[in-house]
Amino acid sequence: MAFPTSLYPVTEIVNDTLNATMFEPPPPSLTWTVLTATSLSIVALTSILGNALVLVTLTVERHLRTPANSLIGSLAVADLLVSLLVMPISASYELTQTWRLGRAMCDIWTILDVTCCTASIMSLCIIALDRYWAITDAVKYVHKRTPKRMMVMIGVVWLLSLCISIPPVFGWRKPEDTADPNNCLISQDHGYTIFSTFGAFYIPLILVLAVYYKIFRAAQARIRKRINSRAKMGLSQSASRSPNVTNRHRTSIFQSLQAEGEATENHLADVERPGGQNGTLQPGRAMRYSRRLNGGHTALDHKDVTPEAVTTTEALQSRMVNQKKILFSKERKAAQTLGVVTGVFVFCWLPFFLVALIGPFCSQCLISDVIRSVVLWLGYVNSMVNPFLYAFLNKDFQKSFKKILFGRR
């Protein structure tokens, strides 16, 4: 006996209700909610306080209002807006897992999110470019580094960021992106995904990596040039006090010292082995070290060199070894600083933009809501860390911070 057709809708409703009940995820526990709320609040509050302190310092301290620091100010403004206008709403959305503010507010929030985060990332790019120009073309760039030029660069950053965030509001998105009133999603349109992710991150990433590599190479060259200049100056001063050292021997000595200044870090191991004291070579080792760098000959091999010249040469060689250690120390510090700056930037934003790029194109890729939330807030963490990397580590800013917070000069 067949079931009456009038019962089919009732049966379907019952089945749908049972399925929804069976597969609906359980509500988060109180412990998870408290821990999540606390963690997100710490990120937001730390970001607000750090970036606000940077802006207050730039406002109060007149000597910090330089064209270069205006770029740091733009970065702080972008990060402060992220922490004030974007993070609180995002935190509420994370905790409730439901969008309750309506479609218009969803559009406003996504525009603010994309604009401010993109402006933060692009501000890092112009800071990198500013540092590169200041190192590679210092004399000319001093005249080009005007407040007007900085304002133009900052204006371009914010204009480009706005151009990346607005298109979905004017229709560059899929109908299903706005179909569910309980969800607030950025446009999943394939064309917009490529446009936004490459414009907001991948192109700036390539630019930052390339510029910071060039900055390191330029800084390395300047450090080595400075060390060699000091060696030449020291040779001239010592030789002028040692009349028994001939011009021919002075040239030989300088070639030896210059070779040491251009030696690789592997040669530094000889200095750190037993036999050296306080980073200097003993006389016998100094002669052998110089002989090795000059193909088996040193300035001390000439018979007409007096004991006074020998002492002068050994002192210069010892000084050069110390300067070479300083050279490698400075290069290592420069590499570490640039490595931290770029590493933090990549660590914070790359996971988010990988998910943002892959998600719309891979319908079979199961990216959980937890992963999406983690990579999103990891990107927000960059706004919290930026004040420490670009302002708090600066000695001028440190003095001003102490003065503002503790009244210390």
Image (cartoon, rainbow, N blue to C red):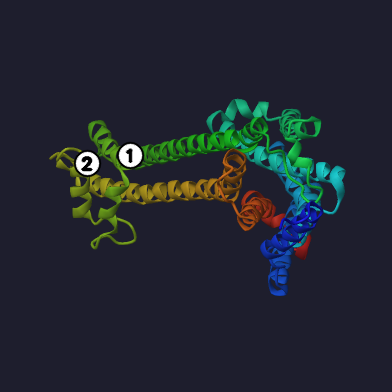
Q: Describe residue 123's horizontal placement relative to residue 110 as left or right.
A: left
SS assignment at label 2? helix
Residue 77 visible in the displayed image: yes
Q: Position of residue 106 (x, y in %)?
A: 82, 45
Q: Nearer the viewer, residue 17 or 257?
A: 17
Q: Position of residue 79 (x, y in %)?
A: 73, 48
Q: Quadrant of the N terminus?
A: bottom right
* Furthest residue in direction front, as rendered: 1
**Residue located at (22% from left, 54% from top):** 283
- Please identify the quadrant where the C terminus is shown: bottom right
Splitting the image into 4 quarters, where does residue 196 fall?
top right
Q: Is residue 245 above or below residue 93?
A: above
The structure residue drawn at horizontal position 27% and vertical position 35%, both measured from the top left corner, is: 255
Q: Quadrant of residue 199?
A: top right
The answer to whether marks 1 and 2 mark residues whose Cβ atoms lie closer than 8 Å is no
* Label annotation for residue 349: none
On the image, numbered disc 1 is attached to which residue?
A: 262
Q: Vertical placement of 156 versus 375: above or below? A: above
